Amino acid sequence: LDAARIANAKLNDVADLSEHPFLTNAAAQIGGADVRMAALPIRTQNMANAQVPTLGAHSDSVRKEFTT
């Protein structure tokens, strides 16, 4: 492709992506386990570990918003 002057790029695997210099990682707690994951591409004031809600944790409150 390079010889034919056709645009191309290296395909990254998951390890390459997680170590990419432009990707920042953040810690989160999911189901009681500490997990490192890609950080949101926005700045936040509170850099503490995020507590990710469990599946269905907010279902009742979300349903209530649409039934009133």
Image: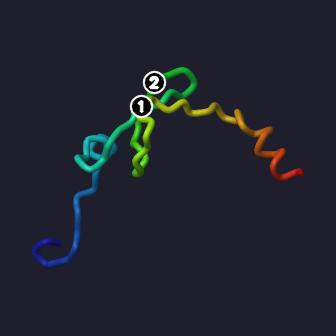
Position of 29 with respect to 63 (left or right) is left
With respect to residue 35, does 3 lie above or below? Answer: below
Residue 51 placement (x, y as % from top left): 54, 30
Residue furthest front in the image: 45
Relative vertical location of residue 35 with respect to residue 13 in this rendering, above or below: above
Work out whether mark 1 precedes mark 2 in sequence or the reverse, and give the earlier one.
1
Q: Quadrant of residue 11?
A: bottom left
The residue tagged 2 is 34
Q: Is residue 66 found left or right of 30 in the rendered image?
A: right
Vertical side of 34 occupied by 39: above or below:
below
Q: Quadrant of the N terminus?
A: bottom left
Q: Which circle marks residue 1 in the picture? A: none
Tell me the kind of residue under disc 1. Answer: Ala
Residue 42 in the image, given as x and y percentages of width and height: 41, 51
Amino acid type, residue under disc 2 in the picture: Asp
Mark 1 — residue?
A: 27
Q: Secondary structure at mark 2?
A: strand
